[in-house]
Image (cartoon, rainbow, N blue to C red):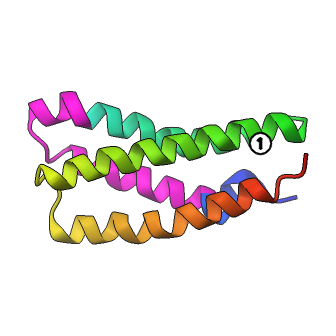
Amino acid sequence: MKEVYELDVYQLSEKLSDLIWYFFDNWDVKTQRTIGYQIIRAADSIAANLSEGYGRFTPKDRKNFYHYARGSFEETKCWLRKAIRRNLLEKDQIEQVSEIINKIGPKLNAFIKNTKL
């Protein structure tokens, strides 16, 4: 069995959260204290919940945490939409996160679906 950090969906979620982490450094204090901390927590939570679920014993328990990961993924997208509307991201940053977001969604849904109950 693979380690959780070897899974594509996990690696993509780590890449997304790392990008957001670095974007934060260029934001003003107001943005960091409002959107910044929220989006970091949401993005970091995707991989964290995948990891926690992966370490659980029962399929039902695992799937529950994978659903939490999907919820964190949706929350991250919400914060990213706000950041884009408020012109907090450069065009190349938007392209970077969009590419990752478009890959994570289907992979995460497939991962959840393939977790047998």
State left or right for residue 27 relative to residue 7.
Answer: left
State left or right for residue 29 relative to residue 45.
Answer: left
> Does the magenta run of residues contain 32?
yes
Residue at x 35% of width, y 56% of height: 19
Whether residue 21 is visible here, answered yes or no, is: no
Q: Which residue is mark 1?
A: 63
Residue 89, image x, y percentages: 17, 57
Whether residue 73 is visible here, answered yes or no, is: yes
Magenta stretch, main secondary structure class: helix
Q: Name the image quarter holding residue 58.
A: top right
Please, is residue 54 above or below residue 100 in the view?
above
Residue at x 81% of width, y 59% of height: 114
Camera-nearest residue between 98 and 1? 98
> Does the magenta run of residues contain 3?
no
Amino acid type assigned to the residue bearing label 1 in the image:
Lys
Image quadrant for the C terminus?
A: top right
Camera-nearest residue between 7 and 109? 109
Q: Name the image quarter holding residue 94.
A: bottom left
Residue at x 8% of width, y 38% of height: 28
State left or right for residue 109 relative to residue 74.
Answer: right
Residue 2, image x, y percentages: 81, 59
Image quadrant for the N terminus?
A: bottom right
Q: Which residues are magenta?
A: 10-35
Residue 34, image x, y percentages: 21, 29
Residue at x 58% of width, y 46% of height: 70
Residue 20, image x, y percentages: 33, 50
Say what secondary structure mark 1 lies in. Answer: helix
State left or right for residue 87 relative to residue 114.
Answer: left
Please, is residue 29 above or below residue 79 in the view?
above
